[in-house]
Amino acid sequence: MKIQAINGFKDILPGNVIRWQYIERCARDIFERFGMQEIRMPIMEKTELFVRSIGEATDVVEKEMYTFIDKGITMRPEATASIMRAFIEHGLHVQQPVQRLYTIGPMFRHERPQKGRLRQFHQLDAEIIGAVEPRIDAELIAMGQMLLDELGLKTSLEINSLGCPVCRPPFKARLITYLEQSIEHLCEDCKRRTHTNPLRVLDCKKPSCRALVVEAPSMLEALCPECDQHFQEVKEALQALRVPFQINRFMVRGLDYYTRTTFEFLTSDLGAQAAVGAGGRYDGLIEQLGGPPLSGIGFAMGMERIALLMEQDTESHLPAASMDIFLAALGSETLAPCSLLAHLLRQQGIRAAIDYSGRSLKAQLKQAGRVNARFTLIVGVDEWSRQEGILRDMTNQVQQPFDMSGTPEEQSLRLKQLLQTTIH
Ligand code: HAM
C-alpha cells in the first residue's frame, strides 16, 4: 500500500515552488524596504502561550490546535504570539524601542481542509512593535497592499476598529443584551457565543444571524474619544498614502488579542476563503504575556491563497527555472572531460546540466529543451579529438565552434566568459 500525505498537509512540488520562491522574494524585498528584519522562531511553543494570547474562547484554541497534551506543547497556529514571546524573552525593545519584525513559515490548525484552507499552511507575517501612532497602522497596511499589488493580485481592503479595554466591555454588554432579545433566531454556535464571545456573532455567515446583526449596535459608534480619534487618523493616513479601503463595521477577528484597528485583504476568487491576509493592533498583548507595556500591530498573509490566486491568473507570468548550459557528451570518452567541465562551471556559479546516459544527440537536445537551457555545448567524439566542441544557442539554433584546447580550467573559464558576453 502506498503511503500518502496526511489530509490537509500538502507537498509543494517543484513546478509550484518557483511561484512560492517568487512570492517570498517579493515579500522579503518589500518588507526590507520598510526596515523590517527577519526573525525565525520554533514551530512548537508552550500551549499556555496561545491560550493566553489568542484567547480561550476562540475557535483556534477551542478546537483547532495540534497539542501534545502530555507535554503541554502546541504546534503554532499563528506567528504573532511566538514573535511576542521571543521579543519579551530576549528583551528586544532594549536594543531598539521600535522593532519591525517579519517571519515566513508553516502554521498548523486542525480545520476542515478545502480549497485555500489547509491544516499545515504558510504565512508571511509582519509586526511593528512599540509604536502607537495611527500613521504606523497606515504604513503597515500600505506595506501589505504594496505586496499584493506587486504580486499582481486584485484584492479589496476592509478596515474596522474594535476599541480598547475602556470602550469594548460596555459595548459587549450592550451587544449581549441585544442578542439575548432574539436569541432563538441565532444559530447553535452563536447562541453559545452570545455569552462566551459575543463579538464573533457579528461576523457569523449564517443568513439568520446576519439578518439580526444588521440592526445590532455598532462598535464604531461606541468607541471612546481616544479610539475614535485613532480610527479617524488611520483613515486619513491611508488616504494620504493612496490606499483605497472600505469600512466594515461587522469585521471581528478570530483571535482575541486585537484592539483598535483591524483589517483584512479580501478576494472573491477563492470561494469561501475570502481572506488573503489579515491583521490588526494588539496594544495590551505584550504586557499580558509578562512583557513591557508596549503596543503592536501586524498582519499575516496566507501563502497558499496567494499562490492559488497567482495560479488562477493567466496573466501573471513567472520566470521559468532555467539552466545556463547543457553539456551534450556524445560517446563514452567525452563523458569524463564533460563531467569535469560541468563541475568546474558550477564552481564558477554557472547553472550547468549534463546527461550521463550516452543517448543520441536528438534525445539530449530534447532534454536540454526540457531543462530550459540557454545554450548546449555539443561534444562529439570527432570534435573532441580535434579539441573542439559546438556551442548551440537554444533560442535561435545558431551554432558556433568552441575551442576546447588547454586545461579543463582554461576551457571552463573561456566558456564562462563566452556565456556571459553572449547572454548580456
Ligand atoms: P488569521 O486571520 O488567523 O490571522 O490568519 C491570517 C491569514 O492566514 C488568513 O487571512 C489566511 O490567508 C491565512 N490562513 C489562516 N488559516 C489558514 C488555513 N487553515 N489555511 C490556509 N491559510 C490560512 C493571524 O494569524 C494573525 N496572527 C495575523 C496577525 C499578525 N495579526 C497581527 N499580527
Image: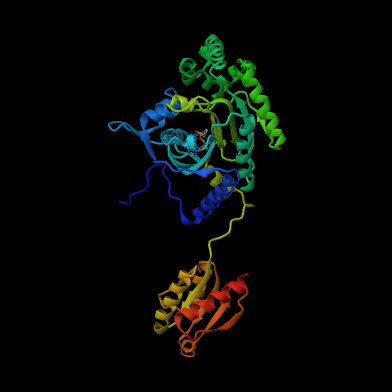
Give above or below for 97 relative to 224. Answer: below
Q: Can residue 9 be seen in this snapshot? A: yes
Colouring convention used in this rendered image of the protein: rainbow
Q: What residue is shown at x 60% (from left), y 40% (from top)?
A: 144
Tell me residue 179's x, y (percent): 54, 13
Q: Can residue 124 be seen in this snapshot? A: no
Q: Is residue 153 left or right of residue 103?
A: right
So how many labels did they put on this image?
A: 0
Instruction: Locate the C terminus and report the quarter of the image it occupies.
Output: bottom right
Tell me residue 349's x, y (percent): 50, 67
Tell me residue 150's x, y (percent): 63, 47
Q: Nearer the viewer, residue 111 or 75?
A: 75
Q: Nearer the viewer, residue 384 or 100?
A: 100
Q: Is residue 128 left or right of residue 49?
A: right
Q: Nearer the viewer, residue 133 or 46?
A: 133
Q: Is residue 10 left or right of residue 131?
A: left
Give above or below for 230 relative to 422. Answer: above
Tell me residue 379's x, y (percent): 48, 82
In the displayed orientation, state which residue is furthest to the left. 70
Q: What residue is shown at x 41% (from left), y 36% (from top)?
A: 76
Q: What residue is shown at x 43% (from left), y 72% (from top)?
A: 343
Give above or below for 28 relative to 99. Answer: below
Quadrant position of residue 134: top right
Give above or below for 276 relative to 47. Answer: below
